[in-house]
Image (spheres, rainbow, N blue to C red):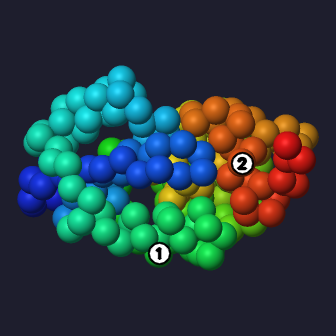
Amino acid sequence: MNNYGQSTVEWTVVSTGIGPLLLAATGQGLVSVVFHADGPVREKALGQLRDRLGTEPVESASGLLAEPIRRLSAYFAGELREFGLPLDWSLSTGFNRQVLRELAAGVPYGTVVGYGDLAKRVGQPAAAQAVGAAMGSNPLPVVVPCHRVVESDGGLGGFGGGLETKRQLLALEGVLPEPLF
């Protein structure tokens, strides 16, 4: 059920260099970003939004989503390093929300952090695996940059959008070299 005092959820799908992204927002801010948002993925995501937020999402690329669309476009064009958008955290709770908020605030563009390091930052040094689960639960990928969380040995770790998407985002931010072809 929604707990943010209003019931509008607007959504749209935008084309990006990493494929179509579904964006959804409430009056509180951006609430969801979904990778690979073509037919079946889009329908499943809209069903989950309906169930979790207790209202029927309305398709609209203006209104609540105009600014998130503009900023994502600037990010993918290499012109924006910090989104600075209001975020609606209602799809994340507890430890996951704590970790994701720390990630959003404390891991800037062009940098990476290890799962264990992020666990230490939230006062749970033994919780690296739980941090991995929190990354997997992130309702706001790209904007809350779970692609910047990597394994301590230099491995990329997992990624809900797929490892190729994670590589592309890290290359965009200059952390990894752009592929030659």
- Closest to the observer: 117 or 109? 109
Residue 124 seen in the figure: no
Please name the residue that numbered disc 1 is placed on: 84
Q: Earlier in the sequence, mark 1 or mark 2?
A: 1
Q: Which mark is residue 168?
A: 2
Q: Measured from the top left, where is residue 114 in percent x and y?
A: 77, 49
Q: Residue at x 16, y 58 (%)?
A: 4
What is the number of callouts on the image?
Answer: 2
Dot 1: within a 10 Å radius of its alpha carbon, few (fewer than 14), some, or many (20 or more) residues?
few
Residue at the far top: name it. Answer: 40
State the image coordinates of residue 151 (x, y, percent, origin top left): 80, 41
Whether residue 122 can be seen here: yes
Which amino acid does the dot numbered 2 rest on?
Gln
Q: Amino acid at mark 1?
A: Gly
| Relative side of 10 to 79, left or right | left
Q: Position of residue 112 (x, y in %)?
A: 76, 57
Q: Quadrant of the N terminus?
A: top left
* Numbered disc 2: secondary structure: helix
Between tags 1 and 2, which lies in front? 2
Marks 1/2: CA–CA distance: 22 Å
Q: Residue 96: x percent and y percent?
A: 48, 44
Q: Image quarter for residue 121?
A: bottom right
Q: Quadrant of the C terminus?
A: top right
